Amino acid sequence: MAARINTLDPPSSASSESEIEEMQTDFSEVFPDADVDEEKSGDFYNTPASPITVPYCPRPPSTGSQKSPKSRRQRTTSLNQSAKKSTAESIIRTQHRTIYTAGRPPWYNSEGQKVEPFVIGICGGSASGKTTVAEKIIESLGVPWVTLLSMDSFYKVLNEKQHEIADRNEYNFDHPDAFDFDLLISTLQRLKEGRKVEVPIYNFVTHSRESRTKTMYGANVIIFEGILTFHNPKVVEMLDMKIFVDTDADVRLARRLRRDITQRGRDLDGVLKQYTSMVQPSFNHYIAPLMSHADIIVPRGGENEVAIQLIVQHVHTQLQLRGLKLREELAQAYAINKQPRPDTVKLLPTTPQIRGLHTFIRNKDTPRDEFIFYSKRLIRLVIEYTLSLMSFVDKTVETPQGVLYHGKRMATSNICGVSILRAGETMEQAVCDVCKDIRIGKILIQTNLQTGEPELYYLRLPKDIKDYKVILMDATVATGAAAMMAIRVLLDHDVLESNILIVSLLMAESGVQSIAYAFPKVQIVTTAIDPEINDKFYVLPGIGNFGDRYFGTEPSDC
Amino acid sequence: MGSQDIELNYGYELCKEYKGLHILYTHHQVKELQTILRDKNTSRSDFKFYADRLIRLVIEDSLNQLPFTDCKVITPTGATYNGLKYRSGNCGVSIVRSGEAMEQGLRDCCRSIRIGKILVESDADTHEARVVYARFPEDIAQRYVLLMYPIMSTGNTVSKAINVLKEHGVKEECIVLSNLFCTPQAVQAVLDSYPKMKILTSEVHPVAPNHFGQKYFGTD
């Protein structure tokens, strides 16, 4: 590892890139032309354009290009072996040119509670092939949502003196003291809880953390790799499966020599000195003994197909045990236990206007311009009603007539809208018309046609969303599966459950029940609740496919 | 906040007394809009923004007062929805100038509704209101009329306008006044003279924000 000092090139053994691509593919799916650089730089949430004040949310024109090439080169936690990168990219490309296959499936059960991800720890000496093993596992797993966390992100920030030592190639990066285990443990813990984390980006030139961080999410499978992954007992406890990659010392030295000399232009003596004085002793003292913690020892690293197949089989079994048929379960759960409507459900008073508007938009013969016009009116009403559910405080103002007026003021100015694409987008305009300069986030959830399950493809939220009241918008809610996924995403971003309002034009009774049961503090606002859902998960009598009717993308045979 | 309760009571007491008076359901968010409009420190752009929001709410609620019939429609899923249909033959009439601020709100709800206008001026010396100009759809006598006037402090102007409508054959029970702020005296004056009509307002308060028209149109 010491070989990494002073190099501008990202070290090849550090490898969090693949998971960023893997994972953020899912978010960028709807933007096939999304510039991968931006995703790679990891500041998906930190781009200045991410808090959005306009109803319509284009990607920032060229966030990627704002970064100097230098800062990109300094990123240490990236996979820079071009062959690997291009495979990862080509997978992404083919995926979003074809059907949506890469959305994130539910990571919580039908009660909205999170299911713990499966955490794999990979340990092994420098240049033992940990990254290759991790990648082979990801490849063979075929699970679309995997997070790969590298221990290299957690190197300690060096002080001036240590910096000088490092400059002389004498700082021991292979020693446990070189790592910030506290941060590592809290990060891994959050990932395991399915929450969003900001992973530091370690700069090997300045030996400090860059101001930017990389945003990562919990996933169904988390792979954590590094030279000392089994060193800390708390970390070991969090790992569901522990793999030690045991590659012959000669092979490791040979790889290291080749890498440092041919790829990084270092001289033979320097590399050997480092190896004998620090890398080799550290391996013997700290890394090799960790083998005893391992569940599986993989000799020869990534070439060992048999071992990898065994690992993959085991992970599959474990995932199946935790697997879920969410939507079906939701529909069934309702059929079994009908309950009184909880009081977090706020139904607009059914005035003649509301019924009149529903008459227009429910009628299958309503032409599209009228459909849009009347649904907009209805949306405006439901948004105004939603605002009335916020908390208010007294306010006294002076009037031009010279008397004081005792009025009210909304207690919070931190309100943001989040729309569930596509149908929820139709409600953004109304939110912007009612709240000046409101920030709008977006979440794309699509139903997988094969499994009928909702899948998460893309999300972009205001960065400090945890401080906001969130108006979550979707035009219709049937089983509530998509809405629950969106609520889960918000909770994973630390939004308080009581700060979420899910707003829609029409909900099915069962969807209302499921959401209210899973998230008892979320307020549910709608203009009408219909009694049933048909076997295609459409609400009855319903509106039909709201998005298709609004955007004019109905299948032609209808 | 004792005074606040008293202010609210104006409305409730009057509602009991006058069946024709309807007050927009006052949740705090409507109160917030009213507070902003009454605040003398509100900027003009804010004023217009929040006035338009309040107007929209008042108009939507006024439309609830118009007649409708039940009807059934088939939804795209093939099921039947028991809905209702508004009768055609409504029209809007705005009282120039401040009433015109509400026209856009009405247009946003009813795209092709006919809108008539009345100009009432009060004599500088006698404070007597007189009608200077009136232009209506020809068949206004057969229509329901949504009369728009945001601020009513004495009710003189509105009374004049209603007189003109009645002269054109509009039935008293077919008139709905859409109003943002009115005083108790104005409610009494208008509904005592025209008991069959309806008033829909967002607030009944002894002090009317008379600066509304000036500030909305920026002529203050």
Image: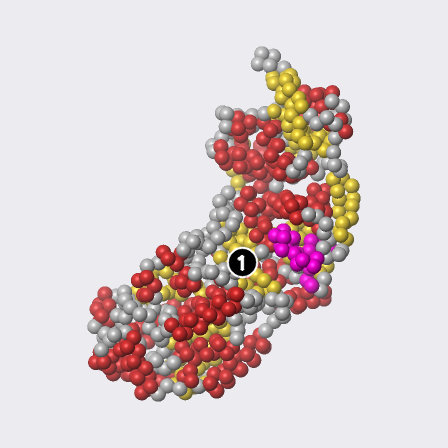
Circle 1 crowding by C-alpha within 10 Å: few under 14, some 14–19, many from 20: many
Q: Which quadrant, please, contains the C terminus of chain A?
A: bottom right
* Label total for image: 1
Q: What stretch of residues is rendered in magenta?
A: A536-558
Q: Identify the residue at image location x=52%, y=65%.
A: A96
Going by the numbered disc 1, the residue's amino acid type is Ile
Q: Name the residue rendered at 38%, 83% in the picture.
A: A290
Q: Chain of mark 1?
A: A
Residue B172: which quarter of the image?
A: top right
Using the rendered image of the protein, determine whether residue A468 is visible from the camera's viewpoint: no
Q: Quadrant of the N terminus of chain A?
A: bottom left
Give coordinates of residue B137: x percent, y percent.
Answer: 70, 27
Secondary structure at numbered mark 1:
strand
Whole-percent x and y of residue A102? 53, 68
Q: Is residue A434 left or right of residue A51?
A: right
Q: Is residue A539 magenta?
A: yes
Image position of A306 (left or right of B76): left
A323 in relation to B52, above or below: below
Judging from the image, the colouring scheme is secondary structure
The prevailing secondary structure element of the residues shown in magenta is loop
Instruction: Based on the picture, tell me whether residue B190 belongs to the magenta stretch.
Output: no
Which residue has dot 1 on it?
A443
